[in-house]
Amino acid sequence: MLKKITKTTENILNLFPFFFGNISSWLILLMIFLSSMIVILRYVFEIGVVAMQELLVYSHGMLFLFYAALALKDDAHVRVDIFYRELSDKRKRMINFFGNLFFLQPFAWAILIFSFEYVYFAWSINEISPEPGGLPFVYLFKTSLIIFPILLILQSFSELIKLVFKHD
């Protein structure tokens, strides 16, 4: 019964990285389109569109922020594992457990806590781009600084459940 509950909890927590991972996939297509349009408009028609350039920059940042939790779920983060690869599965689980608990969780919580006021201020003034012709809704993009640590925290809980109850 406990195994079923923990597996269900893990599956529910894994929905969030999948959802934002899909958004990341679409952001890649958006970035390709924006890059192409910026080049065509700039070098063919000699038109510079600041809003498009800013959207490209924010999309690039959001791509990494939104995909980080899915990369954690898929164990796709780059690591230097000189010793790790030689360890037994039990030791790997211990390292991953303590890494999640004592490094990832505090890191994600710190980002969440320290970025909250920054994002709140952006929303309170409906922050816009300081550039002429820039984006009128910068505060929406800054919200990704809150979404990122929340996704990491949720995925970290999912990983901890998997490590404690040995779900694969």
Image (cartoon, helix red, strand yellow):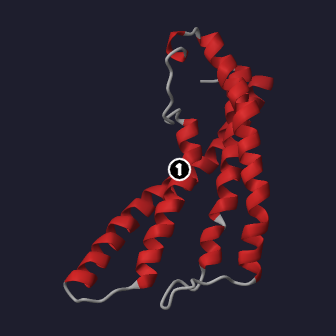
| Residue 78 position (above or below residue 118) | above
Specify the quadrant of the image occupied by residue 98. top right
Q: Measured from the top left, where is residue 51 in percent x and y? A: 45, 82
Picture quarter with the C terminus: top right
Give the residue at mark 1: 67
Q: Residue at x 60, y 70 (%)?
A: 141
Picture quarter with the N terminus: top right
| Residue 111 position (above or below residue 115) | above
One can see residue 1 in this view: no
SS assignment at label 1? helix
One can see residue 14 in this view: yes
Q: Measured from the top left, where is residue 45 in percent x and y? A: 22, 89
Nearer to us in this view, 24 or 148: 148
Q: Residue at x 28, y 72 (%)?
A: 36
Q: Residue at x 66, y 82 (%)?
A: 127
| Residue 68 position (above or below residue 6) | below
Q: Measured from the top left, where is residue 103 in percent x and y? A: 71, 34
Dot 1 amino acid type: Tyr
Relative placement, left or right, of 129 versus 50 is: right
